[in-house]
Image (cartoon, rainbow, N blue to C red):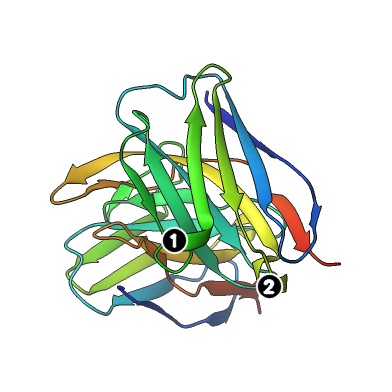
Amino acid sequence: QVQLQESGPGLVKPSQTLSLTCTVSGGSISSDGYFWSWIRQLPGKGLEWIGNIYYTGYNYYPNPSLKSRVTISLDTSKNQLSLKLSSVTAADTAVYYCSRAPLAYCGGDCLPGAFGFWGQGTLVTVSS
Amino acid sequence: DIQLTQSPSFLSTSVGDRVTITCRASQGISSYLAWYQQKPGKAPKLLIYTTSTLQSGVPSRFSGSGSGTEFTLTISSLQPEDFATYYCQQFNSYPLTFGGGTKVEIK
């Protein structure tokens, strides 16, 4: 059974870069046909997709609302997924989840299907 | 971006009741819709994908239907462990989006 575990600082100062890691166990991050994603949930609010990357590391899709600030990457040697979000403000305070989804289909873009595996989430607070 | 509107946003109901939650998309998404259940302090749990396929291990009292722009999640007989918040999510096109959620509470 695949398990995902987020880790990183729980407190980040405004204007700095939020950096999180998701460690995958029970399966390889290079497993054929899977997307790895970051999703966040603002306090008391709904879910926001941040972006995803295909297992090859080549098909990378960030949310346009965050595009200029987001970097998602894979480290196959450590079986980890990472998230970097630059120039953070208090509006980026949220619980951050990593997740896995199978490839759904490819048209002009390739898209993941539903998110079947999730980490437990990690709360990141942006405050000075 | 495709907007997903869930209704109702809040539901007060009783054990044994039949519950229906609707998710409307701002444009057609074929059958590329999933439903999740989230309990306080926990990650969302996948219930249904591609509109109507039950995720392994999910009780058969949960079902999904719809196509195009209107979708429903039905719980045939609500159990105590079903009190939670439910979200729909589309994977028809980028950016992936979620509905605003439906909180199901005990009457």
Question: Which mark is in front, 1 or 2?
Answer: 1
The quadrant of the picture occupied by the C terminus of chain B is bottom right
Q: Nearer the viewer, residue B17 or A58?
A: A58
- Position of residue A21 measured from the top left corner of the image (x, y, whole percent): 64, 37
Q: Nearer the viewer, residue A44 or A66?
A: A66
Residue that label 2 marks: A44
Q: Is residue B87 visible?
A: yes
> To which chain does the residue with label 1 belong?
A
Residue at 42% in and 54% down:
B61
Q: Secondary structure at mark 2?
A: loop
Please say if A62 is above or below B70.
above
* Mark 1 surroundings within 10 Å by alpha-carbon count, few (fewer than 14), some (14 through 19), many (20 or more): few
- Position of residue A108 measured from the top left corner of the image (x, y, whole percent): 14, 51
- Position of residue B30 measured from the top left corner of the image (x, y, whole percent): 16, 62
The amino acid sitting under disc 1 is Lys
* Mark 2 surroundings within 10 Å by alpha-carbon count, few (fewer than 14), some (14 through 19), many (20 or more): few
Q: Earlier in the sequence, mark 1 or mark 2?
A: 2
Q: Is residue A121 visible?
A: no
- Position of residue A78 measured from the top left corner of the image (x, y, whole percent): 58, 19
> To which chain does the residue with label 2 belong?
A
- Is residue A128 found left or right of B56 in the rendered image? right
Residue that label 1 marks: A67
Residue at 55% in and 19% down:
A26
Q: Secondary structure at mark 1?
A: helix
Residue at 58% in and 72% down:
B104
**Residue lying farthest left?**
A107
Discs 1 and 2 share one subunit: yes
